[in-house]
Image: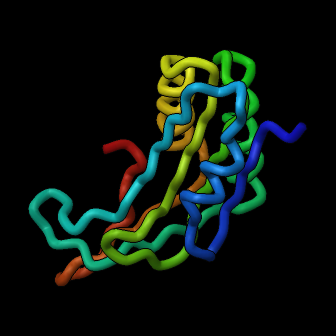
């Protein structure tokens, strides 16, 4: 049984596919983290974000995160999907889905995955404003 689904893609991410991947009859909890492009940063209007990565290394790191989540939390399955390219306000750049028998494990593993992804995965974000653009630190 496959317990990990990871990808980096220029296609639109699917909540449904992540949910279906982690869903299982033995699981009473599914935790989802859905990152969305917001329209405001530090008082400036954001028009779009541009995500780019060192894809080979980023996928390797995302797989490490998923494996570590399985090893350190009593979870059943995990999906970590990230988008690349230009995303508009309201678009989804990242989805993390985790299933487990009980909610605490799913919540904890989901938070571990997004926090670790932001710190260790070579994916970069550029914010576009009315007056220019700026590369953004992965930590808020």
Farthest residue to the left: give it. Answer: 43
How many dots with numbers?
A: 0
- Residue nearest the observer in this picture, 82 or 53: 82
Quick check: 29 above or below 48? Answer: above
Screen quadrant of the N terminus: top right
Point 41% across, 70% down: residue: 91
Point 56% across, 18% down: residue: 102
In the rendered structure, the answer to whether residue 11 lies left or right of residue 114 reads right
- Residue nearest the observer in this picture, 59 or 77: 77
The image shows residue 97 at horizontal and vertical percentages of 58, 42
Point 68% across, 41% down: residue: 22
Point 9% across, 62% down: residue: 43
In the rendered structure, the answer to whether residue 46 lies left or right of residue 87 reads left
Residue 109 quadrant: top right
- Residue nearest the observer in this picture, 102 or 82: 102
In the rendered structure, the answer to whether residue 48 lies left or right of residue 24 reads left
Quick check: 130 above or below 122? Answer: below
The image shows residue 93 at horizontal and vertical percentages of 48, 62
Screen quadrant of the C terminus: top left
The image shows residue 27 at horizontal and vertical percentages of 65, 27
Q: How is the image coloured?
A: rainbow
The image shows residue 48 at horizontal and vertical percentages of 34, 76
Farthest residue to the right: give it. Answer: 1
């Amino acid at each position: 049984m496959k317990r990990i689904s990871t990808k980096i893609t220029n296609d639109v991410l699917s909540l449904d596919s992540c949910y279906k991947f982690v869903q299982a009859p033995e699981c009473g909890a599914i935790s989802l983290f859905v990152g969305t492009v917001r329209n405001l940063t530090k008082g400036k209007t954001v028009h779009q974000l541009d995500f780019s990565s060192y894809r080979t290394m980023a996928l390797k790191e995302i797989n490490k995160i998923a494996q570590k989540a399985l090893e350190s939390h009593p979870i059943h399955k995990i999906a970590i999907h990230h988008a690349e390219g230009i995303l508009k306000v309201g678009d989804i750049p990242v989805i993390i889905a985790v299933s487990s028998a009980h909610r605490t494990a799913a919540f904890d593993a989901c938070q571990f995955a997004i926090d670790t992804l932001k710190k260790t995965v070579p994916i970069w974000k550029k914010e576009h404003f009315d007056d220019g653009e700026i590369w953004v630190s992965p930590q808020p």
